[in-house]
Amino acid sequence: MQPSSDIQRLLDIMAALRTPETGCGWDLAQTFETIAPYTIEEAYEVADAIARGDFADLRDELGDLLLQVAFHARLAEENGSFDFGGVVEAITQKMIRRHPHVFGDATDLLPHEVKAQWARIKAQEKAAKTAAAGEAGDRAGIGLLDDIPLALPGLSRAVKLQQKASSVGFDWNDIHVVLGKIREETAEIEAALDSGEADAIEDEIGDLLFAAANVARHAGVDPEAAARRANAKFERRFRFIEEALAQRGVAPGKASLAEMDALWNEAKGGEKQREG
């Protein structure tokens, strides 16, 4: 088959891969559940390409993510639930509905008014879903926090939970109070470590991470992005240590902690000089 920029070609390829007897054995064996982890992974790879500013890679990663949408839509079409056209129709309806200031009469809104309008329309949509679920005898999704996906990364889900709670006034208005919670949680971790109880240690570390996500939210920082940045910083500085030790003919496992720590500080100092 020839490459194409036409979305229909991608859908045709997906259909061919899923055709019994003539398709791909691996693709035929997949389900929504087995594909879901790949969907999450591809979304992270999109974010990684953006963070690196690699637009050639971003194009490829967006294609991989689009393939995930096509794959899920094909599975749904096969079981009679919906098809790719239904996915496109649903999102176009939603975007038009949530942007009356562009596609309707609510014009000349300020950015904060647009955000408030979006939240209001989204709440109305949720209320309609809840009412429909109640009529169908399904009570799922009736709580304020019930529509936050469990599959979200922990820190991202923490922020979503906190934002929802904040929408009804359950929040601190001062970031310094939240910072105090960080100090409180570190003290509780120390107490848990002294007790030696594994469950208590895990619980308290979880509370600390939740509080850290809360600080990030109050500071307007994406905690997942901050974590990725911290990871990249660690990798960069550790590579400096490895290279410096290699120049001395020393393997990392043979160097002392003091020697590696000195090199870490050297890497850190070099970064600050370059930033300055």
Image: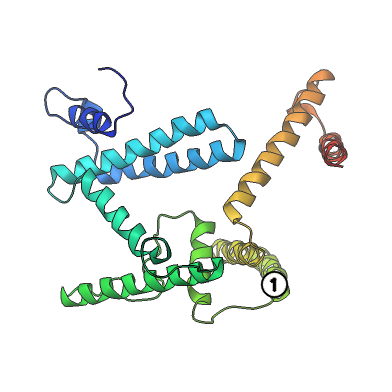
Q: Give the left or right position of residue 143, taking residue 138 as reference.
A: right
Tag 1's secondary structure?
helix
Q: Is residue 119 above or below residue 80?
A: below
Q: Quadrant of the N terminus?
A: top left
Q: Is residue 242 above or below residue 48?
A: above
Q: Is residue 159 above or below residue 45?
A: below
Residue at mark 1: 175
Q: Quadrant of the C terminus?
A: top right
Nearer-the-camera pick, 104 or 274: 104
Crowd around label 1: few <14 · some 14–19 · many ≥20 (10 Å): some
The image shows residue 4 at horizontal and vertical percentages of 31, 24
Residue 18 location, quadrant? top left
The image shows residue 150 at horizontal and vertical percentages of 40, 59
Nearer-the-camera pick, 205 or 9: 9
Q: Give the left or right position of residue 268, taking residue 232 as reference.
A: right
Q: Residue furthest bottom?
A: 169
Nearer-the-camera pick, 76 or 206: 76
- Residue at 45 percent of width and 34 percent of height: 61
The image shows residue 159 at horizontal and vertical percentages of 53, 64
Nearer-the-camera pick, 72 or 244: 72
Q: Give the left or right position of residue 67, taking residue 25 as reference.
A: right
Q: Give the left or right position of residue 121, taking residue 46 as reference.
A: left
Q: Amino acid at mark 1?
A: Ile
- Residue at 54 percent of width and 32 percent of height: 55
The image shows residue 109 at horizontal and vertical percentages of 50, 69
Residue 201 location, quadrant? bottom right
Residue 15 location, quadrant? top left
- Residue at 84 percent of width and 34 percent of height: 263
